[in-house]
Image: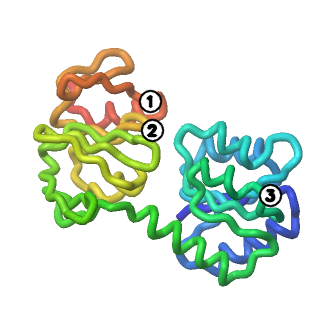
């Protein structure tokens, strides 16, 4: 997981940087002293996890969360616990009170790993199993029209039915290895085989108009067989 540290305290950043380096599943993508610096990295890099302080000069950690449309996994690392209730309204995965210990840090990272695995299991390139309540539902990937982000869930739209599972878009994107699927927007993955029309910055899949994000358009066009 690519990890970003955001904290105005230099000592706190160094402690977290050391924790990240000691953890095999983490890669340090950046260490920022404020939310503005973090926003610049987030615009230019795909980050899986943010270790975020709350009380910072200027834009606070909670202010930064409010600006994000699609949030990476968030672990708050802060000196006060009074923000916990408000923080969890933004779907943070864990809340660590300073000073953090490595054991507590590792526990939070393991919780993130379990969350990002989602509730979709890949069995082959041709089908997946989605966990819905206590059932595992088999889905033929050729029947999938598109996948849509919906908060902490994703909606899988198929030719037969719609299925909602608790997962992140990134987790699902990583699990579907079938070459027919492409990310076209921060909130959409589509099955290329089921695209019926493309005009300007929109495409049509099974009568559903789906926007094409500017940062995804080039990769989509490379995947299409245009004559």
Residue at point 45%, 38% (across, down): 186
Numbered mark located on residue 225 in the image: none
Q: Which of marks 2 and 1 is in front?
A: 2
Residue at left 36%, top 57%?
A: 174
Q: Name the residue under label 3.
A: 7
| 206 over 37 or under it: above or below | above
The one of 72 and 31 positioned closer to us in this rendering: 72
Count of all numbered marks drawn on residues in the image: 3
- Residue visible at 55% across and 78% down in the picture: 24
**Secondary element at image label 3:** loop
Front-most of residues 19 and 135: 135
**Which callout, 2 or 3, points at the residue further toward the start of the chain?**
3
Q: Position of residue 176 (x, y in %)?
A: 27, 55
Mark in front: 1 vs 3: 3
Q: Looking at the rendering, which quadrant does residue 92 occupy?
A: bottom right
Query: As rendered, which of 105 and 10 lies closer to the eye?
Result: 105
Q: Where is residue 96 in the image (x, y as percent from the top left)?
A: 71, 69
Mark 3: few, some, or many residues within 10 Å (few <14, many ≥20)?
many
**Are circles 2 and 1 on residues that touch, CB within 8 Å?**
yes
The local crowd at label 2, few if under 14, some if 14 to 19, many if 20 or more residues have their Cα within 10 Å, is some
Q: What element carries label 2?
A: loop
> Mark 1 sits on what residue?
213
Q: Distance between the residues labelled 1 and 3?
A: 31 Å
- Within 10 Å of disc 1 (Cα), the crowding (few <14, some 14-19, many 20+) is some
Of the two numbered discs 1 and 3 on the same chain, state the one appearing first in sequence: 3
Label 2 sits on residue: 186
Question: Looking at the picture, does residue 36 appear above or below residue 118?
Answer: above
**From what the image shows, is residue 201 above or below residue 89?**
above
The image quarter containing residue 171 is bottom left
In this picture, residue 211 sits left or right of residue 203: right
Residue 191 in view in this figure: no
Q: Position of residue 130 (x, y in %)?
A: 24, 58
């Amino acid at each position: 997981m690519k990890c970003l540290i955001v904290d105005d305290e230099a000592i706190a950043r160094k402690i977290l940087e050391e924790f990240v380096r000691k953890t095999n599943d983490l890669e340090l993508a950046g260490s920022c002293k404020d939310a503005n610096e973090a926003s610049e990295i987030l615009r230019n890099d795909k980050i899986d996890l943010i270790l975020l302080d709350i009380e910072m000069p200027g834009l606070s950690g909670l202010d930064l969360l409010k600006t994000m449309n699609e949030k990476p996994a968030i672990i708050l690392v802060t000196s006060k616990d009074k923000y916990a209730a408000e923080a969890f309204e933004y779907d943070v995965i864990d809340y660590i009170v300073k000073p953090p210990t490595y054991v507590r840090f590792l526990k939070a990272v393991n919780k993130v790993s379990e969350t990002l695995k989602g509730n979709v299991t890949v069995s082959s390139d041709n089908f997946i199993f989605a966990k819905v309540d206590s059932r595992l539902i088999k889905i033929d990937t050729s029947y999938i029209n598109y996948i849509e982000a919906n908060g902490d869930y994703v909606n899988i739209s198929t030719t037969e039915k719609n299925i909602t599972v608790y997962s992140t878009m990134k987790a699902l994107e990583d699990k579907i290895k079938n070459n027919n699927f492409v990310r076209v927007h921060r909130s959409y993955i589509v099955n290329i085989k089921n695209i019926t029309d493309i005009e300007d910055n929109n495409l049509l899949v099974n009568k559903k108009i789906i926007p094409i994000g500017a940062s995804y358009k080039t990769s989509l066009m490379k995947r299409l067989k245009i004559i």
